Image: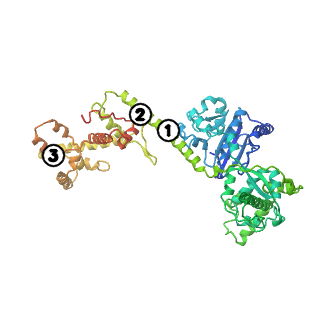
């Protein structure tokens, strides 16, 4: 991920790192070589908002970097990815990173084929393009790689970092149709526009992107400029329209066509009549002309003010630093501080650079329109008809096709996942062949569960072992010995009481009074009244519980031996009367086995819990026999 706290929306970022640390002059030479190599691919391409560009940067290591806003035209982003792969093939000693506002979007594209250890939290500084291939820095080699660590690893261990073929294919298939797809993404349309607009497009066809953007994102302020058309319609309705071809992206064409716009009163629109084609050409040309008028005056204003996004960031820094001292916006003191800030900003280099950048299209338009031009320059030329725009109305088929491909990819991924799971289960079954629930170590299961319960837990949940070789549990030895002595004294007093009164049943687990440190049980001078009360309370509780069905919910300590004696109903009745202690381990194992058996081989809570503890129960082959 990029280090910026908030990335611009719909923007792709890229950085190009040379293997060796280059001087500024060498890096500039690299810069020129790369742009020269890409020239055949981008010379006729119309970008939605920005063209592919590179600039020099020194941090954290000397490299070339760039950003490109693609907006509604996702083709620009993938064409950029194609160009970066092309750079990596032509210049093998470069490592390239690319990401966008959503993060590592190349990994998103190959999501079904990534190694399981890779996730958005640990993907930083791992994904690179090198020598025309995708490279992933392995976690086992660099658990938390810095950028410099990753770049060095790519140089010294290039074969180890190359991603699996499935990942390569998933990403490369997305750009396999370029550069031909980039050409198909261009749409040429025949329009009728004022002479001034035709002259600008003849010299700078790429300015169509600014005109379409201004038209598509128009607001009340920019609409005021379009209503007057002072720059591109100096003669008003007397202005002559000329027929020209305009090249734009399909996204731009869709933005123009799918918006209804009333022509300004001063615009020389033909009467809607018999020449339907001519009217549509004029209507589309009118939208383009209005877009040029809007962008000209808006950029001129922003250039004079030198503000825009740069001023917004500057103002935001002032606010964070406490410059306005918590004053209410609009107050007299606030306005004074704002005027001082604006004055300082206008004197800064930041203002100069911003002003030049914002007003650059305005200066270029003024230069073009200063040349001699007339309607005669465009008459008698062969203007081919517009390209077929059926794609604009058949997009649903393309979308369904893309969704079907994704669905197939998902189904294939799930199928492979099921095959792996079945293979693993068959291996586990084979390794434990001949085993069933009868010879499975149920005692080990109870111990494993006890170890799991006593494991340390945190806000993330309980710590579960990755295998059955569980670590020993740390205990407080002194406290353990003290508790054991307390229990032994209590048991000794119970035996004495039983010898004195043989008719009384043994105490169950439920009448065990656990004091905080066991001192009450060890106190030989305990008050006889209190001791008598406890015995009376215990007897009353036993009698109350005997009249419920609670005892039938558990297996008791002596229940197994009684079941082995057939035909001794009197003994069973006696056992029922005693309300013997509950065998915790046996009940735990029985409940787990019942839950596992009820799953009938399907995933469920019992198998999931046991799986977390590293225990795999064999299937009960005797069930139903």
Which mark's residue is nearer the viewer, 2 or 3?
Answer: 2
Q: How far apart are the two marked residues, 1 and 3, measured between alpha carbons?
A: 57 Å
Q: How far apart are the two marked residues, 2 and 3, measured between alpha carbons?
A: 47 Å
Can you identify the residue that label 1 sits on? Answer: 413
Residue 286: tell me if it is visible: yes
Percent across and percent down for residue 567 are 10, 38
Can you identify the residue that label 2 sits on? Answer: 422
Q: How far apart are the two marked residues, 1 and 2, measured between alpha carbons?
A: 14 Å
User: Secondary structure under badge 1?
Assistant: helix
Residue contact between numbered discs 2 and 3, judged by CB atoms under 8 Å: no
Residue 349: tell me if it is visible: no
User: Secondary structure under badge 3?
Assistant: helix
Residue at the extreme bottom of the image, as rendered: 332
Which mark's residue is nearer the viewer, 1 or 3?
Answer: 1
Q: Earlier in the sequence, mark 1 or mark 3?
A: 1
Can you identify the residue that label 3 sits on? Answer: 576
């Amino acid at each position: 991920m990029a280090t910026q706290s908030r990335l611009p929306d719909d923007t792709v970022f890229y950085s190009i790192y040379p293997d060796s640390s280059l001087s500024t002059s060498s890096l500039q030479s690299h810069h020129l070589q790369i742009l020269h190599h890409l020239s055949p691919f981008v010379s006729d391409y119309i970008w939605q908002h920005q063209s592919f560009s590179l600039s020099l940067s020194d941090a954290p290591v000397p490299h070339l970097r760039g950003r490109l806003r693609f907006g509604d035209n996702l083709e620009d982003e993938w064409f950029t990815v194609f160009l970066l792969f092309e750079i990596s093939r032509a210049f093998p000693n470069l490592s390239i990173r690319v990401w966008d506002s959503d993060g590592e979007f190349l990994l998103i594209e190959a999501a079904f084929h990534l190694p399981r250890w890779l996730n958005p939290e640990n993907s930083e500084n791992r994904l690179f393009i090198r020598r025309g291939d995708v490279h992933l820095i392995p976690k086992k080699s660099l658990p938390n790689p810095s950028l410099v660590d990753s770049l060095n690893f790519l140089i010294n261990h290039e074969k180890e970092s190359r991603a699996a073929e499935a990942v390569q294919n998933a990403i490369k298939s997305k750009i396999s149709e370029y550069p031909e797809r980039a050409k198909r993404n261009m749409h040429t349309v025949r329009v009728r526009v004022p002479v001034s607009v035709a002259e600008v497009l003849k010299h700078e066809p790429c300015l169509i992107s600014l005109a379409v953007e201004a038209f598509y994102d128009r607001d009340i302020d920019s609409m005021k400029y379009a209503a007057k058309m002072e720059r591109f319609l100096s003669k008003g309705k007397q202005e002559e329209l000329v027929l020209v071809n305009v090249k734009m992206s399909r996204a731009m064409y869709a933005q123009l066509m799918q918006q209804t716009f009333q022509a300004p009163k001063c615009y020389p629109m033909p009467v809607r009549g018999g020449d339907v084609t001519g009217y549509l050409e004029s209507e589309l040309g009118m939208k383009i002309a209005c877009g040029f008028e809007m962008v000209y005056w808006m950029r001129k204003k922003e250039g004079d003010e030198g503000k825009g996004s740069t001023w917004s960031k500057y103002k935001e820094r002032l606010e964070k630093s406490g410059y306005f001292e918590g004053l209410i916006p609009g107050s007299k003191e606030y306005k004074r501080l704002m005027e001082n800030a604006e004055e300082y900003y206008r004197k800064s280099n930041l203002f100069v650079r911003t002003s030049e950048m914002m007003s650059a299209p305005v200066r270029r338009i003024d230069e073009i329109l200063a040349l001699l031009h007339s309607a005669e320059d465009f008459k008698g030329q062969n203007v081919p008809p517009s390209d077929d725009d059926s794609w604009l109305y058949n997009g649903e088929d393309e979308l369904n096709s893309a969704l079907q491909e994704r669905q197939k990819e998902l189904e294939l991924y799930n199928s492979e996942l099921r095959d792996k799971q079945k293979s693993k289960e068959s291996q586990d079954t084979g390794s434990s062949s001949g085993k069933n629930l009868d010879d499975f170590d149920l005692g080990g299961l109870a111990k494993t569960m006890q170890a799991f319960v006593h494991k340390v837990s945190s806000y993330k949940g309980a710590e579960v072992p990755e295998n059955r070789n569980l670590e020993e549990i740390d205990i407080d030895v002194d406290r353990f010995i003290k508790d054991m002595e307390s229990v032994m004294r209590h048991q000794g007093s119970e035996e004495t009481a039983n010898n004195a009164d043989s008719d009384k049943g043994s105490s169950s687990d439920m009448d065990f009074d656990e004091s905080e440190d066991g001192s009450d049980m060890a106190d030989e001078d305990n008050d006889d009244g209190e001791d008598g009360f406890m015995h009376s309370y215990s007897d009353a509780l036993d009698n109350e519980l005997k009249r419920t069905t609670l005892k039938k919910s558990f297996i008791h300590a002596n229940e197994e031996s009684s079941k082995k004696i057939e035909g001794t109903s009197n003994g069973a009745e006696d056992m029922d009367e005693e309300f013997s202690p509950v065998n915790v381990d046996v009940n735990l194992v029985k409940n787990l086995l019942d839950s596992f058996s009820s799953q009938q081989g399907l995933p469920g809570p019992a198998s999931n819990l046991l799986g977390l503890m590293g225990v795999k129960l064999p299937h009960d082959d005797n069930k139903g026999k």
